[in-house]
Image (spheres, rainbow, N blue to C red):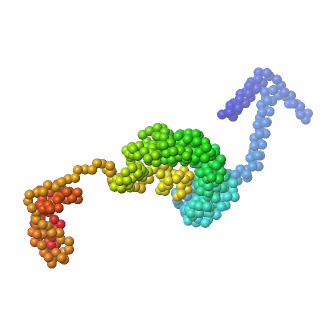
Amino acid sequence: MIRILLFLAVVFALGLGFAWLADRPGEMVVTFSGYQYQVSLMVAAVAVVAVVAAVMIVWWLIKSLWNSPYTISRYFRVRRRDRGYQALSTGMIAAGAGDGALARKKTKEAAKLIRSDQEPLIQLLEAQASLLEGDHEGAREKFETMLDDPEMRLLGLRGLYLEAERLGDRNAARHYAGRAAAMAPQLAWAAESTLEDLTGRGDWDGALKLVEAQKSTRQIERDAANRRRAVLLTAKAQALIDSDPNAAKTAAIEANRLRPDFAPAAVVAAKLLFRQNDVRKGAKILEAAWKAEPHPEIAELYTHARPADAVLDRLNRAKKLQEMKKNHAESSLTVARAALDAQDYKTARQEAEAAIRMDRREGAYLLLADIEEAETGDQGKVRQLLSKAVRAPRDPAWVADGVVSDRWAPVSPITGKLDAFEWRAPMERLGQLIDSHEDAPDAAVPTIAAPIKPAKENVIELNPAVSAEKPTTAAASESDEDQVTPVTATAFAAVPPDAEAVEPAEELARLPDDPGVDPDEEDPKSPRKFRLF
């Protein structure tokens, strides 16, 4: 657009110039070699413009002829390059579709038309074609060749990483991922694999640096980065809790600042503060974490903050926690445990039963069994409570990839994933689905009314051979007798020992979709009948 405007401006200026000359007539005299040429000023201006234009045209023709070999060669070179990129595009599509033969064919065609040092994608297409053909050794050689090219180095590392993962060589895979992460921390695959390697080796400082690099490159969100930093700082504090308490305390307090509701960080920070006799600050950390989410480790550490405290003092501290989080099963269980230690069985029983009403689970029944044994020593009730505990849902625990642990760990022992443990109830127990009316009151025991008509004695045939030798007329003659209604074992227990066997008074009604069997009709294939009643 700007060029067009400039061209129009030049043409307009030339028009103004010629109009100006036309309005001012004059003559121009040129003497050359004894001849005198006299023309008007307008004609002279037109002649000068025509000469300049002719010179420019002649120069363009000469230049075009001079550069024609280069122009022709460039035309064919561009055409050859276009054909090569077309073959490369077709080959990449074929590789993505899994057509190894076409990918190999287009690779060779593209390599003939385009130099591989000028187009790195040819190397990638060749490596992909080798993978599709099953030539993994050739593909690895291509990926190793890419390491010499700074532009292709990350691609080569990615290919070697995937090949090492395919072969199950975790050390080699993490080596390639570490090199890639050092060059480009924004690569998710490299950063995650390197992070697993660092956490697996316990290099918490290196893992923290990598997480910070991920945060700076905006690979992960700020909240996710803070969560990872809290987990890594907590793991670092646990590792240094005995060797370097000051560094462990700094790391734990930083982790608690990033995630105040993270129970492991709060427990480690408070434990280190308690060791340095800073009970007040440690208690505040535990109280804040308890308000966010009650946890038994928090309650245990809070109630035993001062080892020399009496049992009543621990009970009062447990009640203080309960005031912070009312109507919660964990609060009631905490008070119940402290009351049991203080031998306040009434309070312990009330709180344990309240915890069962709020959250029926194994630990509440076990605690109630301990209270029953300590208070009354009634082994029958203790066994009853223990049986309920076996069938009740399990208490929450740290669960990761199917592993249930009483203690938190920063990484999963199965997959090595960071922050894999979750505080929840394991799902492997199914007894509570069957015994859903465990706490229901005992139902009334049914009784059997003895009919007046006596019943004949029934014989049960269990061995056909023996019954053949000792035929019983009673079993053979009762083919059309009524069936008896099945009763429970409790009902049988209610019958007196000297009661006489009776014949049922009513006949069982058949189901609407059951046509039944004629008792007088015998099976022609069976020579004898087998009856239980």
Q: Is residue 380 above or below residue 28?
A: below
How far across and down, in percent of the image, does residue 145 sit? 67, 61
Q: Nearer the viewer, residue 416 or 248?
A: 248
Q: Residue at x 70, y 32 (%)?
A: 7
Q: What number of labels is visible?
A: 0
Quadrant containing the N terminus in the rendered view? top right
Q: Which quadrant would residue 56 be assigned to in this image?
A: top right
Q: Is residue 32 above or below residue 289?
A: above
Q: Which quadrant would residue 83 be assigned to in this image?
A: bottom right
How far across and down, in percent of the image, does residue 55 sit? 79, 39
Q: Residue at x 61, y 65 (%)?
A: 138
- Of all residues, the one furthest to the bottom in this rendering is 469
How far across and down, in percent of the image, does residue 330 sit? 45, 45
Tell me if residue 484 can be seen: yes
- Of all residues, the one furthest to the top in this rendering is 23
Q: Is residue 142 above or below residue 205?
A: below
Q: Nearer the viewer, residue 207 or 263?
A: 263
Left or right of residue 433, residue 319 in this image: right
Q: Residue at x 91, y 33 (%)?
A: 34
Left or right of residue 432, residue 508 in this image: left
Tell me if residue 210 can be seen: no
How far across and down, in percent of the image, does residue 402 sit? 47, 56
Left or right of residue 80, residue 338 in this image: left
Q: Residue at x 61, y 49 (%)?
A: 237
